[in-house]
Amino acid sequence: MISPFARYGLLLAVLCAIAVAVSGPGYRMGWWPLPVAFGMLRWPTYAAIAATLIGAVGAVLTRRGRTRRGFGYALAAMVIGLATSAGPLTLMWRAKQVPPIHDISTDTDNPPQFVAVLPLRAGAANPATYGGPEVAAQQKKAFPQIAPLAFPLPPEQAFARALAVAQGMGWAIASTSPAEGRIEATATTPFFGFRDDVVIRVTAAPPGSRVDVRSLSRIGRSDLGANARRVESFLKKLGGDS
C-alpha cells in the first residue's frame, strides 16, 4: 500500500506548482486581478514547503525495508515542493534586501524626463515625476554602482549604439529624438507582464558623450531591484561595445 504521506504530499506539491506557474500568466492574460495573482504566488509557496515536509516524512516511511510503498512519490513531492517554493522565496528574500522604490536613475539630481511614453502611462499607479531626494538617497545607499556612462564616442554615434542596445534587449521603442539625444522605450517583464518605462539621454561630455538612463515601473511600490538590474545591464552592454 502506498503511504498517504507520499501520495498526498505529491498531490499537494503538484497543485502548488500549477497555482504558482499560472499566477503571473493568468494576470497577464486578464484572467484575475493582481492581488489574486500575488495570493496564488504566496500561499501555494507556503503549501509547497508543507508538501516538501510531508514528502520527507513519506520518504522515511517508505524507504527500503518498510512495508509501505511510494518512495518515488515521496521523492517527487520533495523535488516539486522545493522547486515550486524556491523562486517565490527568492523574491521574498530580495524584497527585504532592497529599498521600496521603483524609480532608478543614473542622474538623481537631474533625471532624464519622459515625454513620449506619458500617454502610455495614463492611469498608471506610479507617477512619472521623480520622487526627489528621499528616493535618491535610498537608491544611492542600495545601488551605489548606478552612475552615468562616459562614452568615448561623439553623441551621434553614442545615440545610435544606445538605440541598438535597447532594441537588442527586447524593449519596445516608443520614441527616438536624435536632436534631443533622447530614447524612450518600454520593457515588459516575462512572468507577470509588468511594463516598466525607460528613458535614455545622450549628451556631449568628455571623453565624447555621457549616457544617462532612467527606468520606472508603472505599478508597485517596490520593484525588487528590477529597474536597477535593467539599468546596470543596459550600461554594461553599451560599455562593453565601446
Image: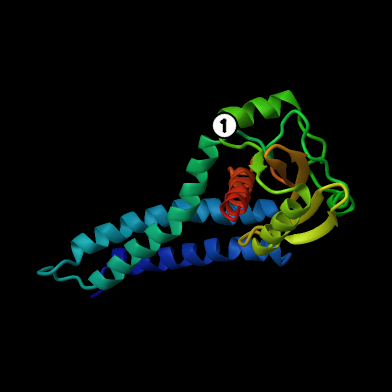
The x, y position of residue 71, in whole percent, is: 23, 70
Q: Nearer the viewer, residue 73 or 138?
A: 138
95 sits left or right of 231 in the view: left
Residue drawn at point x = 50 percent, y = 56 percent: 44
Q: Which residue is mark 1?
A: 144
State which quarter of the image contains the N terminus. bottom left
Secondary structure at numbered mark 1: loop
The x, y position of residue 199, in whole percent, is: 77, 48
Quadrant position of residue 189: bottom right
Quadrant position of residue 10: bottom left
Depicted 168 relative to depicted 85: above or below? below
Residue drawn at point x = 65 percent, y = 63 percent: 168
Q: Nearer the viewer, residue 160 or 74?
A: 160
Mark 1 is on which residue type? Pro
Residue drawn at point x = 16 percent, y = 66 percent: 63
Dot 1: within a 10 Å radius of its alpha carbon, few (fewer than 14), some, or many (20 or more) residues?
A: few
